[in-house]
Image (cartoon, rainbow, N blue to C red):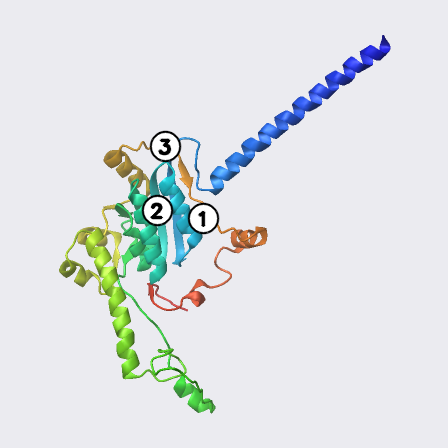
């Protein structure tokens, strides 16, 4: 009789243990699902408004573009808010971001909110939105392109250093700090800059519904405050994210009560890389040192 009692007690203990581990397993699956949803841009969990932060210097980022493609495909994402605080960056990076935002805009409304700064490639990116908002005191505009180099041949002469190079043609590796900038090289470089400038002006004319003649005086590289940009037709309204939500509600019927979820764009570079990015951000290694080729960037001090 005592043996039967012991068996019953053991079975009850086993059932309790199995029940406990089942609960743990279910909780773990729920947690993994939540983490996965957050990592891949907030897919699932009901309707929401996605938001992506575009800050610092803009480069081409495949992970960012992939995240935006996920937002475009996610039926739960009813709209996208693009928070911009950037002086610009590479032309190719700004163009890639512009194209990605237009992809999203083909399926759901996109509104850009310019913070302190949204100039050059930052403004180019904002053009990908359906509606652009900036603060009255925001700095925007700086529509233009630049290619920089430095001629240090005079300094090398004083130091007694004579650089040598063997090239397939005179225009290879021009402009080059180690060679004088020839007139032929200058003409070829100016043609490249003019072509990309024409691309930028065309984007502004198309997206802001202006003629090229109307855009030309605005695209001389000057910056504008938010108030000036509104008067010139470069943006659609003044304010911040609250005004962006008001526009989504009035123009597209997207309730202001819908939650906002961030778009995750972190590259899968491993735990150490992610930790360093969280701790130091992009300040440890100057982004400006990575700017090669054509850039569209405004900053009062380019060091």
Q: Residue at x 48, y 39 (%)?
A: 38
Mark 3 or mark 1: whose residue is earlier in sequence? 3
Quadrant of the rendering where the C terminus is positioned: bottom left
Q: Report the residue marked by disc 3.
A: 258
Q: Report the residue marked by disc 1.
A: 265
Q: Report the residue marked by disc 2.
A: 82
**Spatial distance from mark 3 to mark 2, Cα to Cα?**
16 Å
Residue that protrudes farthest toward the front in the picture: 168
Q: Nearer the viewer, residue 2 or 256?
A: 2
* Residue 221 visible, this angle: no
Mark 1 or mark 2: whose residue is earlier in sequence? 2
Q: Position of residue 291 (x, y in %)?
A: 40, 66
Quarter holding residue 13: top right
Q: Position of residue 183 (x, y in %)?
A: 27, 83
Assign a secondary structure to mark 1: loop
Q: Nearer the viewer, mark 3 or mark 1?
A: 1
Mark 3 or mark 2: whose residue is earlier in sequence? 2
**Other-residue count near label 3 (Cα within 10 Å), few / some / many at <14 / 14–19 / ≥20:** some
Q: Position of residue 274 (x, y in %)?
A: 54, 51
* Residue 27 visible, this angle: yes
Quadrant of the rendering where the N terminus is positioned: top right
Q: Residue at x 33, y 82 (%)?
A: 181
- Kindly check if marks 1 and 2 are in contact, taking CB atoms under 8 A apart as contact: no
Q: Residue at x 37, y 40 (%)?
A: 73
Seen in the picture, residue 133 relative to 145 is either above or below; the reply is above
Seen in the picture, residue 136 relative to 23 is either above or below; the reply is below
Assign a secondary structure to mark 2: strand
Seen in the picture, residue 124 relative to 12 is either above or below; the reply is below
Q: Position of residue 208 (x, y in %)?
A: 20, 51
- Kindly check if marks 3 and 2 are in contact, taking CB atoms under 8 A apart as contact: no
Quarter holding residue 143: bottom left
Assign a secondary structure to mark 3: loop
């Amino acid at each position: 009789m005592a043996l039967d009692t012991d068996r019953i007690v053991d079975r009850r203990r086993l059932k309790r243990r199995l029940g406990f581990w089942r609960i743990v397993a279910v909780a773990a699956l729920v947690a993994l699902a939540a983490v996965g949803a957050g990592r891949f841009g907030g897919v699932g969990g009901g309707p929401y408004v996605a938001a992506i932060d575009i800050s610092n210097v803009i480069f081409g980022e495949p992970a960012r573009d992939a995240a935006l493609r996920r937002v475009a495909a996610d039926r739960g994402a009813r709209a996208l808010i693009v928070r911009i605080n950037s002086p610009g960056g590479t032309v190719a990076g700004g163009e890639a971001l512009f194209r990605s935002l237009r992809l999203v805009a083909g399926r759901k409304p996109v509104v850009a909110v310019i913070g302190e700064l949204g100039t050059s490639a930052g403004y180019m990116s904002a053009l990908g939105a359906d509606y652009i908002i900036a603060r009255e005191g925001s700095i925007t505009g700086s529509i233009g392109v630049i290619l920089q180099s430095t001629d240090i041949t005079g300094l090398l002469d004083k130091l007694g250093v004579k650089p040598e190079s063997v090239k397939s043609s005179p225009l290879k590796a021009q402009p080059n700090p180690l060679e004088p900038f020839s007139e032929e090289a200058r003409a070829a470089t100016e043609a490249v800059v003019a072509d990309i400038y024409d691309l930028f002006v065309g984007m502004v004319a198309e997206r802001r519904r202006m003629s090229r003649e109307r855009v030309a005086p605005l695209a001389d590289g000057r910056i504008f405050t938010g108030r000036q940009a509104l008067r010139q037709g470069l943006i659609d309204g003044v304010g911040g994210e609250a005004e962006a939500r008001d526009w989504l509600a009035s123009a597209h019927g997207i309730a202001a009560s819908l939650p906002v979820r961030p778009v995750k764009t972190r590259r899968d570079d491993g735990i150490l890389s992610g930790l360093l990015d969280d701790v130091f951000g992009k300040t440890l290694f100057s982004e400006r040192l990575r700017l090669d080729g054509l850039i569209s960037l405004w900053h009062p001090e380019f060091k």
